[in-house]
Amino acid sequence: MNKFLLMVLCIFTVSSANAQVTTYLDEAKGLGAAAGQGLACGASKYETFEMLSRAIIVTKATSDRQQAEGMYAYNDMKANAYMSKQMDAFFDCPNISRRFDNQEIFNITLYADGSMRMPDGQILTPRQPYDATMLFRQNPKEREEAQAIYDKGKDVRVGEVTLRTAGEAPVKFMPPNAVKAPSTKRR
């Protein structure tokens, strides 16, 4: 019985330790999701957040490839979060903006060479020093440009889509605003 309890305790400890590890890409995606909501809701500290989150992605990357993957994941989640906030008609934006502007990330000190002092006092240095001012240039029209891209996507008509799953017959799906595509069959 004691061995069984010890084994269960070990499994629980290992699984809870694994659940707490955040990977580089998960962190980049999390930062991107927060940035997208901050942009959509017009958070007052959005530009500072954008600069700090990009610095985190660049500084924590162990290679150029990982940095590129991190930036892609960041921008992808940022766009998804922005569109999601658009689709829910900016629901709860005042509270989101308030929480956004009070995040722990704003306690990070970013130095000119890309080094960062984290809120816990830890110093992170990039693998190659860089000019931190080049990470993000403020664009006052960024929200309008994102809105224009979102609005343009609403005008795209989707035709008939065939969904296939392993071992099942294809299922046809026609979105409500779909335009029937011309038939390619020859008679």
Image (cartoon, rainbow, N blue to C red):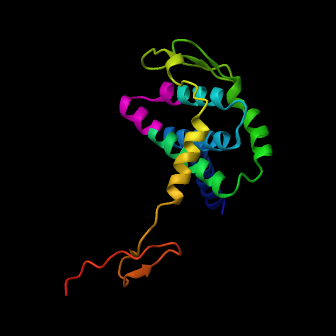
Seen from the viewer's position, the closer of residues 133 and 151 is 151
Side of 123 relative to 120 (left or right) = left
The magenta-colored residue range is 57-71
Question: On screen, 62 above or below 95?
Answer: above
Residue in the picture at 49% in, 19% down: 134
Q: State the image quarter where residue 180 is shown.
A: bottom left
Locate the N terminus by quadrant. bottom right
Q: Residue furthest bottom?
A: 187
Inspect the magenta stretch and tell me whether residue 55 lies in it. Answer: no
Side of 141 relative to 43 (left or right) = left
Exactly how many numbered labels are in the figure? 0
Residue in the picture at 56% in, 53% down: 151
**Residue 116: x %, y % from top left:** 59, 19
- Say if residue 9 shows up in the picture: no
The rendered magenta stretch, by its main secondary structure, is classed as: helix
Locate the C terminus by quadrant. bottom left
**Residue 186: x %, y % from top left:** 19, 83
- Say if residue 139 shows up in the picture: yes
Residue in the picture at 47% in, 61% down: 156
**Residue 117: x %, y % from top left:** 63, 18
Q: Residue furthest top?
A: 112
**Residue 24: x %, y % from top left:** 50, 38
Seen from the viewer's position, the closer of residues 156 and 1 is 156
